[in-house]
Image (tube, rainbow, N blue to C red):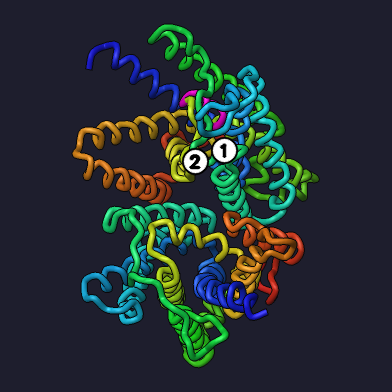
Amino acid sequence: MEIGGLLLYFTALVTMGGIYAVSALGLNLNWGMTGLFNVGIAGFFAVGAYTSALLTAPPIEAGTAAQGAGGLSLPMPVGWLAAMALAAAVAWVVGRICLRLKSDYLAIATIGIAEIIRLVARNEQALTGGSFGIKAIPRPFETLERPWGEIAMMLLIAAIVLAIYLFLQRARNSPWGRVMRAIRDNETAAEAMGKDVEAFRLQAFVIGSALMGLAGALTAHYLKVLTPEATEPLQATFLVYVMLIAGGSGNNRGAILGAIVVWLLWTATELVTGRLPVEWGVRIAYGRMFLVGLLLVVVLQRFPGGLLPERPPKLAGDGAR
Amino acid sequence: MIDFINNYLIAGLVLGSIYALGAIGISMIYSILRFAHFAHGDLMTFGAYAALAVVTAMGWPALAALPFALIAAAVVALFVDRYAYRPFRKSRPIVVVIASFGVALMIRSGVMLIWGVQPESYASGIQSALESLEPLRILPKHLVIFGTAVVLMTAMHLLLTRTKIGKAMRAMSDDPDLARITGIATERVIAWTWVVGAVLAGAAGVLTAVDTQVIPDMGWNLLLPIFAAAILGGLGRPYGAVLGGLVIGMVEELSSYPLFGDDPLVSPGYKTGIAFAVMVVMLIWRPQGLLKGRIL
């Protein structure tokens, strides 16, 4: 591979890994910090992706043979903000109903929401374009020449990840973050201290889900096409769990590292399968799914802390002691 | 009226008995092992494919292949419990739930690796309704499904009420600590729970395939209604699971009844959504379920 190709491969790797890091950071706020078992990442991801795509894609000209759904041609930042807002709104409704219940119910409820959103994406031809999906979604910097457009996109994603990281790190070290960990580790004690557990959990759930919605929007813009396949739970939900748990659940840096490392491994297997005969290539794609499942079980059994285990933030009085 | 029975009631009963078989396992595993088992749907898929292997290799009808599928499902469940779940017995239950998602992915992709993704079926051709039962329109496969489900549920009932291990299972489900100090061999009870749950799940998979076809996603698609059924009936209540399964099956089928005008009440594409809606209403209104089960 020549140097130009290698550079493009690297930008694609970092861009997509960075988008996964946004999802993983959102999940870290849900699961890692607050202990909310949200298995509906794919659902919030889809809400964000479709919202942003529908707002920013060009409309379909009447009378043309184009299939799928058209959009409103609004500027991209509007789409992104709307994606986060709508994902947050959906999360708020789900959270109001289900956060009172313990984690297993939340898992079932979030999976259910994700499946219903997938059904809507598939069935509502008029809104989502059904299986044709939405095409020609704008990508930031796509007018720039190769490879500058790709590099600019990569830097944009990196900046977004950094901004979210700083925001979440700040939240984690604040009194708010301490309450979150208190709820995760001992809900009864937190409640006895007079904390409104339900309200705090709802906040964490909504903000985390908004980040998953943003990840969906970024994916749609990066790939430029959006079909219901993009919201399959394997890649949108379970791969993110592997990333977070392997990286270090509860640790924001771990979430980012996990996303990049696992995405690197994931695409590396694609390089291998791409070279095999088609018949084998297809089978090995299932092998990758097997690998996601196996990794989930093995990491949980052997390395529950992940690559960067959680370290509680220093308290103000720690230095003095 | 007869159209209503033929098109909706019979379909609901058939679907409901399949859901019931799956929900019993979910309910029992929850009450004895204390976790929501998300690989249950894929265990069903495995059962269906195991029967498919016997059907294609030996040329037998599906019902003859059923025992082999049930044994295979039980073996897989015991293997999975030993290597994937047992190391987590002492950790927080939610960790096992995550692991069960991993197991679900492994079973499904294993099935895809061995059998591929194209839809298969046990027998080709379209069945015609039994003439002796006119004007009721009942297909032979409906009788097979319903009959098998009733036999298996009766067997489960006898196991739970008449045998020592069944009583131990009920004791552990009611109060695990009390069961332990009275000297019940916990691991043995757990093993039996997996066998019972997997046998019923495998049967649900085979019966679904008898009704429709065999595809790798079949179990995953059944997971939501089955959880809904288990919660509706009350977790830890096997008879509640049967009731819940029948209710969910009926409600799903009735949801496409054209109550107003000619259009179905709810588009058939959203059938899964109905089960989910029933579950959410139940979680808000009566989280312990109809038969007063456990609240997670």
The percent coordinates of residue A17 (x first, y second) are 44, 27
Pick whichever, A221 or B93, lies toward us. Answer: A221
The percent coordinates of residue A42 (x first, y second) are 54, 42
On what subunit does the disc labeled 2 rest? A
Q: Is residue A237 left or right of residue A318?
A: left
Q: Which residue is mark 2?
A: A131
Q: What's the residue at 41%, 28% (across, down)?
A: A260
Q: What's the residue at 47%, 90% (across, down)?
A: B163
Which secondary structure class fits the magenta region best?
helix
Q: Which mark is residue A46?
A: 1
Quadrant of the rendered image containing residue A30: top right
The percent coordinates of residue A65 (x first, y second) are 50, 29
On the question of residue A232 being in view, the answer is yes
Q: Which mark is residue B97?
A: none
Q: What's the residue at 59%, 53% (across, down)?
A: A112
Q: Which residues are magenta?
A: A216-223
Quadrant of the rendered image containing residue B78: bottom left
